[in-house]
Amino acid sequence: MENSKKNLKTYNKYMSGIRICDWMLFLYLVAVLGVFPWFLHDAYFDITITKYKFIITATFSYIILFVMAYVIETLICYALTNNFKDTYINSVEVKKSWKRPGFWAVAFMLANIFAYIVSVDQTSSMTGSKGRYMGCMMYVLMCIMFLMVSSRAFLNAVLLIIFGCATFFSYFVAIMQHAGNDFMGYKEGISHKSYYIFTSTFGNINIFASFISISLPIFLALYIFSKKLIWKIPSAILVISGGMCLIISNSDSVYLGVGAAFILLFFISYYNGQFTSFVEAVFMMAIGNLLVVIMRMTVECEYDKNRGGVAEVIDKPSVAVAMVVMIVLVYVAVLIGKKKLGDKLELLNKKKVILTMSIIMVVAFVLVIVYGNIKKISLFTFDYEWGTYRGYIWIKCMELFEEAPLTNKLFGYGNETLKMLTTTNFYEEMIDVTGKTYDNAHNEVLQYLVTTGLVGALSYIGMFLSSVVYIIKNAKKNAIAYACGASIVGYFVQGLINVNQPITTPYFFVIMAMGVGYVRYMKKAES
């Protein structure tokens, strides 16, 4: 009897600390957050297949190691307590509900499996080899990984440092390449025509923009909500360098993604009384933009000839300086307001204020769209040429969906079948209108609607929304939790005009799982 109590005490102490499954997750996250960002084989020439093989291997290995670790922990549990009630899965909060991220992860996984079953090209749908390697196998592994990581994610400072270093390296490579110094030799052999559409360790500038939309919100949140200078200083450096990379990526998708993350962090920082830190973070972003403008004035940079969209507007000395000055004035106004109206401001119902501001933003957004349509401004005129022919492929994707049989409406035509569908149904028109062929909808939700049907698209949205709500609702002012929430919002929104691929899309699932698993871990640790 005495030995049994001693064993139970030993086991309970073990269960409350770091466990074998946690170490397996740590190794996986080191690979994904620390190695994956800069891992290349033949520079940009085989970047898609290289990144695909890396993430598939790492994720499959993690799943196997997790299962082995779980079996070992279960055996330890039974040996010390003579029961299975304290196993790894039972030690976390997992409620069965359609509101839970795990429910939607299972739904999304099943949607991809059914999409493969009814696919018009099963070979391509399984591996995605005829497209961007985002086949059924990738999504099944991502969903299984999500279920494991979201059940409990023990995160620590080491992982943040590793990801911070990998991110800074990627930013630094892009900044140096932009200044005409390809010190890593990544662009050797790239044709002059394609030279300026590849950058950093992510290849195409749109994919680099996708990575910025994922990574920059993390360090924005860490700066805003961290209380110690040891975290604020490195976060500030990454925010400034990330601000420089916004222009360098030369993609409107990054402004959409980072802007969405900014709005989320704006509301959270206001609600938690961290608004001054938020304004400081915005100021650092503006400083990053100004530094790129200064670099352009002092270094002959061929990239400037290829500016477009938002980057073209803000890449002017007058605009860059005006942004910095305006933010400084706002910061001063906030400080004065807090000093003179501090008590009165605290008495305001912050939830009602946030609701009011949200309504104002929505109304303003609608009015801008209406005004743009009335004035026939090109940005608000949706036709074939809209968004560098995104309008064309979106219209054609909707036609494919509308004309699909019921089975394909529900479960799609199969992953990575869009190229086959577009070339089969309207190849000549596509060449005449756009001058190229499309293998992706350039809108992730629309991509899933065509390839995995209504079930796939809705479960993907459900997985995202339920994860964001769960993370923010249970964050309890934790900087890491807010960082994960802001990151996945940034990725999801930029994905509305960007493509899914194995270079950055896996981050969305990993960081989403990390955020859900981390708040679950915190809830259990506090109980």
Image (spheres, grey):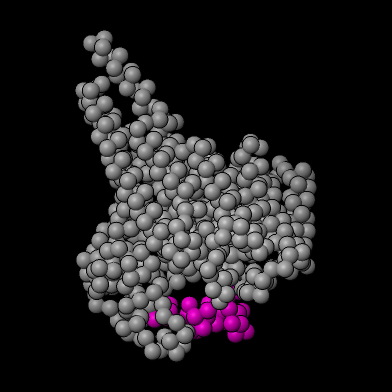
Q: How many marks?
A: 0
Describe residue 227's horizontal placement relative to residue 415 as left or right. right
Against 347, residue 388 (above or below) is below
Residue visible at 54% across and 73% down?
A: 191
Q: Residue 8: where, in percent of width, then height?
A: 29, 19
- Using the image, determine if residue 136 lies above or below residue 436: above
Picture quarter with the N terminus? top left
Residue occupying image coordinates x 33% and y 18%: 9
Residue 38 shows up from this direction: yes
140 inside magenta stretch: no
Question: Going by the image, does 144 lie left or right of 215?
Answer: left
- Residue 190 rendering spot, x and y as whole percentages: 53, 70
Q: List the single residue furthest toward the front.
A: 189
Which corner quadrant holds the C terminus? top left
Would you say the magenta stretch is mainly helix, strand or loop? helix
Task: Please report the bounds of the magenta region as a residue range.
Answer: 367-396
Which residue is drawn at the image coordinates 43% and 64% (left, top)?
A: 46
Q: In the rendered image, which quarter is residue 524 located in?
A: top left
As rendered, which of 241 and 352 lies closer to the eye? 241
Residue in view at x 25 percent, y 15 percent: 4
Judge by depth and name the residue closer to the eye, 27 or 514. 27
Q: From this viewpoint, is residue 111 visible?
A: no
Identify the residue at the far top of this view.
Answer: 2
The location of residue 515, given as percent across then percent down, is 45, 46
Across and down, in percent, residue 165 comes to 56, 46
| Residue 68: quadrant of the picture | top left
Query: Image height check: is 232 above or below 286?
Result: above
Q: Is residue 103 above or below residue 304?
A: above
